[in-house]
Image: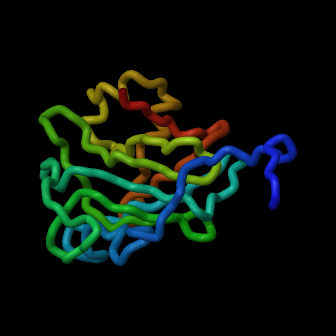
Amino acid sequence: MSTFSTNSQSPTPGQTIGPFFGYALPYEGDADLVPPGSAGSIRLHGWVYDGAGNPIPDALLEIWQTDAEGNVPQAEGSLHRDGWTFTGWGRADTDLNGRYTFSTVLPGASAEGTAPFFALTVFARGLLDKLQTRIYLPDHPGNAGDPLLVSLSEDERATLVATADATGLRFDLHLQGDRETTFLTYG
């Protein structure tokens, strides 16, 4: 008969985010809210960096957004892409170089005078909980009156606005450090 003494065991490191299950991680079309290259599609892409400026090769990002007209999608079926139904939700993981890509549409403003944005959640090793932020469109007139953006300093605000490029928008995330992205809490 063996005995087990808790006094001789060392504690293991605390768990961070997880456990992770294979279901829906990843799945076909997870990052394609619309088919790449389809009419009106854009590429939302960027890199995820740690506090030392190193790319994170195994982060997971999720976005939620309105459609191009500003409607909040009510359609089901995010885990089964049919190529026609816009659900407003997507999931992308970073590659070995810390890069992610979504194929989607520019979100519309959900109300007059508001700024359109992508809601973004980040999961990554070392995080005790997910991080949430927003991605705003560059040079959108609604940004000037957006309650969240106007409440931030200029430096903080700059971390939430994407940069336009030839294929759509680039948005890099810095989880810590001098260039840390402004993250949000929802209460």
Look at 38% across and 65% down and name the residue there: 102
> Is residue 131 among what the camera can see?
yes
- The location of residue 93, given as percent across then percent down, is 49, 65
Is 93 on the left or on the right of 9, as rendered?
left
- The location of residue 13, given as percent across then percent down, is 73, 46
Task: Give the vertical position of 28 relative to 137 (above or below).
Answer: below
Task: Give the vertical position of 156 relative to 131 (above or below).
Answer: above
Look at 42% across and 31% down and name the residue there: 185
Toward the front, the furthest residue is 1
Is 3 on the left or on the right of 179, as rendered?
right
Is 122 on the left or on the right of 54, as rendered?
left
Q: How many marks?
A: 0
Instruction: Please name the colour scheme applied to the rendered image.
Output: rainbow
Toward the top, the furthest residue is 151
Quadrant where the image shows the N terminus = bottom right
Task: Give the vertical position of 62 relative to 136 (above or below).
Answer: below
> Is residue 138 among what the camera can see?
no
- Which is nearer the eye, 20 or 150? 20
- Which is nearer the eye, 154 or 175? 175
- Which is nearer the eye, 164 or 115? 115
Look at 28% across and 58% down and name the residue there: 89
Task: Find residue 42 and report its image quarter.
Answer: bottom left
- The location of residue 33, given as percent across then percent down, is 28, 66
Look at 35% across and 43% down and name the residue there: 136
Quadrant where the image shows the C terminus = top left
- The location of residue 26, given as percent across then percent down, is 43, 71
